[in-house]
């Protein structure tokens, strides 16, 4: 009976999951369609903002030019007008893509200049009446009766590019009409705002003047003569795009309406990958539920047996934990007793040192005490560590250094000590014991032979990780060892001990005396520790 109820719950859950899955897929597809449309609208909106900013630059240029002509004491010559044009453009990179023409009241070219050339197309003295239709001439005649700036429909220039003609009337100081100025600015600079690298490959744009004339960055298709052999590869008619796929906005520039459309070059389809994955997920989950239900029935008895076994395992684990605690306590006691025994040996050596009058014997006993203490310190650190085998190297080094200074240091010695070891660096007991003995020999040697009362002394210890090994660097401010000193043939017990310990650490020692007496020992930690 219980099994039947569970089966009914599973069937109802699968049905509910199927309904929710279908709702999810519908919501996902609607969201993806919205994302596609939002991306198109954002690209179009961003381009419109940039284009309006470009138009503001154009308008400012034309307004500045008009103001200059109005305020000059005398009407400027071609050279003067060209100089002002260059000053006006400044950092704006129009190059030669701006032509400023001055026509008299009979529509005859008086000036034709760019920032770099004067009358390059040879239009000076030519009448516009032979180049433009009668309607445009009438509009220019009407313009000379006003003081407004007007922009006319784009034209194909002889210079080989499409221009936006801005026109305004010019007067002399008696306010007589002299004619009009026609700054013609390259349309490409405006239209390029729509072809940022991020959208060029994905979107296409349409530019319509007065709802009838197509405009590209290279040509305006208004049935006039085309002087430019180049064609814009991004022209919307090069792509098969439905009119319904475009979104439009309008820009009004001094009475000229520029209609701009944007669309995807290729119709963006919603990926069905997520849909297929969702159906696959539903199938896998449904199959998993059925299998789980089957395994549940099959393993019900096994679970009871496992629970019994778990109870027995917990009992055993409790017993093992108690045994482990006893073992850890025993290991700590061993380390503690070893440390105490070493300290007892050190005390015996101290008594022996006091009884001897031989300075050589006292020195040897003192060195033995220091070596024993370095090893005892290892057991003290192991006794206090959680793992009973790892020792914090920096803490150990500082305590060892303090002990040597206390035992054999000279009172009021001016000594600067530097320990450059990572706070988290740890080694096991064997490795630390070897390092401690090496450092004990080096520090003891520095106190005996390197440091002087009449100067500032320094001592520096560092351990750095280098690939698969470590580097111990020890230096002091002493005069150092004699040149060509032979470590292998040295009769010094300390030097022999350092070489032996370095060899036990699978390392090698190098010595240099360039400003400071420096020992460098490359080594690898010992793999097996006696504390394991």
Image (cartoon, helix red, strand yellow):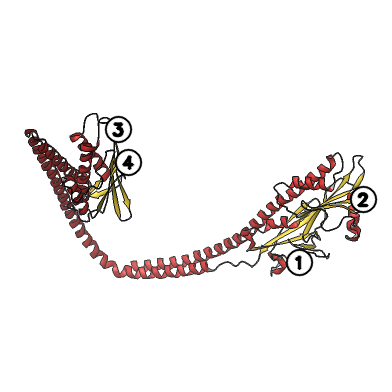
Q: Nearer the viewer, mark 4 or mark 3?
A: 4
Q: Residue furthest left?
A: 355
Taking the spot 79% from the left edge, 62% from the top edge, the residue there is 213
Q: Nearer the viewer, mark 4 or mark 1?
A: 4
User: Eyeballing the image, is 209 above or below 478?
Assistant: below
Q: Mark 1 points at which residue?
A: 229
Q: Which of marks 4 and 3 is nearer the N terminus?
A: 3
Observer able to see residue 388: no
Distance (Cα) linking label 3 and label 1? 85 Å
Q: Mark 4 points at which residue?
A: 515
Question: x, y percentage for residue 276?
Answer: 50, 69
SS under mark 1? loop
Query: Within 10 Å of the Cα at label 1, are there few (<14), some (14-19), or many (20+) other Cα atoms?
Result: few
Query: Within 10 Å of the Cα at label 3, are there few (<14), some (14-19), or many (20+) other Cα atoms?
Result: few
Distance (Cα) linking label 4 and label 2? 92 Å
Do residues under tags 3 and 1 come within 8 Å of each other at their CB atoms?
no
Q: Nearer the viewer, residue 27 or 84?
A: 84
Taking the spot 70% from the left edge, 49% from the top edge, the residue there is 92
């Amino acid at each position: 009976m219980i099994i039947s109820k569970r089966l009914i719950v599973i069937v109802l859950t699968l049905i509910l999951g199927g309904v929710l899955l279908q709702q999810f897929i519908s919501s996902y597809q609607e969201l993806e369609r919205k994302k596609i449309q939002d991306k198109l609208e954002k690209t179009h909106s961003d381009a419109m903002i940039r284009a309006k900013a470009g138009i503001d630059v154009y308008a400012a240029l034309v307004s500045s030019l008009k103001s200059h002509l109005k305020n000059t004491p005398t009407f400027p010559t071609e050279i003067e007008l060209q100089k002002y044009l260059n000053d006006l453009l400044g950092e704006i990179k129009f190059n030669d893509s701006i032509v400023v023409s001055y026509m008299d009241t009979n529509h005859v070219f008086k000036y034709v200049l760019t920032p770099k050339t004067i009358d390059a197309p040879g239009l000076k003295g030519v009448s516009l009446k032979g180049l433009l239709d009668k309607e445009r001439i009438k509009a220019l005649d009407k313009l000379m009766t006003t003081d407004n700036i007007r922009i006319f429909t784009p034209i194909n220039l002889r210079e080989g590019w499409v221009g936006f003609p801005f026109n305004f009337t010019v007067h002399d100081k008696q306010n007589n009409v002299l004619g009009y100025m026609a700054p013609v600015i390259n349309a490409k600079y405006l239209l390029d705002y729509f072809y940022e690298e991020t959208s060029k490959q994905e979107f296409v744009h349409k530019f319509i003047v007065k709802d009838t004339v197509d405009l590209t960055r290279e040509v305006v298709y208004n049935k006039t003569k085309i002087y430019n052999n180049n064609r814009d590869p991004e022209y919307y008619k090069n792509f098969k795009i439905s009119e319904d796929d475009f979104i439009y906005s309008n820009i009004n520039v001094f009475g000229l309406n520029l209609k701009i459309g944007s669309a995807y070059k290729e119709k963006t389809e919603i990926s069905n990958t997520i849909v297929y994955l969702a159906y696959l997920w539903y199938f896998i989950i449904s199959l998993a539920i059925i299998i789980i239900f089957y395994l549940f029935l099959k393993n019900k008895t096994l679970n009871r047996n496992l629970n019994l076994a778990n109870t027995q395992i917990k009992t055993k684990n409790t017993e093992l934990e108690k045994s482990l605690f006893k073992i850890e306590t025993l290991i700590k006691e061993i380390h503690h007793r070893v440390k105490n025994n070493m300290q007892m040996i050190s005390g015996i050596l101290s008594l022996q040192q006091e009884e001897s009058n031989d300075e050589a014997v006292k020195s040897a006993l003192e060195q033995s005490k220091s070596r024993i203490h370095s090893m005892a310190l290892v057991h003290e650190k192991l006794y206090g560590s959680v793992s009973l085998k790892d020792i914090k190297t920096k803490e150990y080094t500082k305590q060892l250094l303090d002990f040597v200074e206390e035992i054999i240091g000279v009172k009021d010695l001016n000594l600067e000590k530097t320990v450059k070891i990572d706070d988290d660096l740890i080694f096991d007991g064997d490795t630390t014991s070897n390092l401690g003995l090496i450092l004990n020999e080096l520090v003891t040697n520095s106190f005996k032979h390197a440091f002087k009362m009449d100067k500032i002394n320094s001592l520096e210890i560092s351990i750095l990780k280098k690939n698969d090994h470590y580097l111990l660097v020890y230096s002091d401010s002493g005069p150092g060892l004699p040149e060509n000193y032979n470590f292998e043939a040295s009769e010094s017990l300390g030097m022999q001990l350092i070489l032996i310990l370095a060899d036990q650490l699978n390392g090698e020692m190098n010595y240099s005396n360039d400003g400071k007496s420096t020992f460098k020992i490359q080594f690898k930690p010992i793999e097996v520790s006696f504390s394991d």
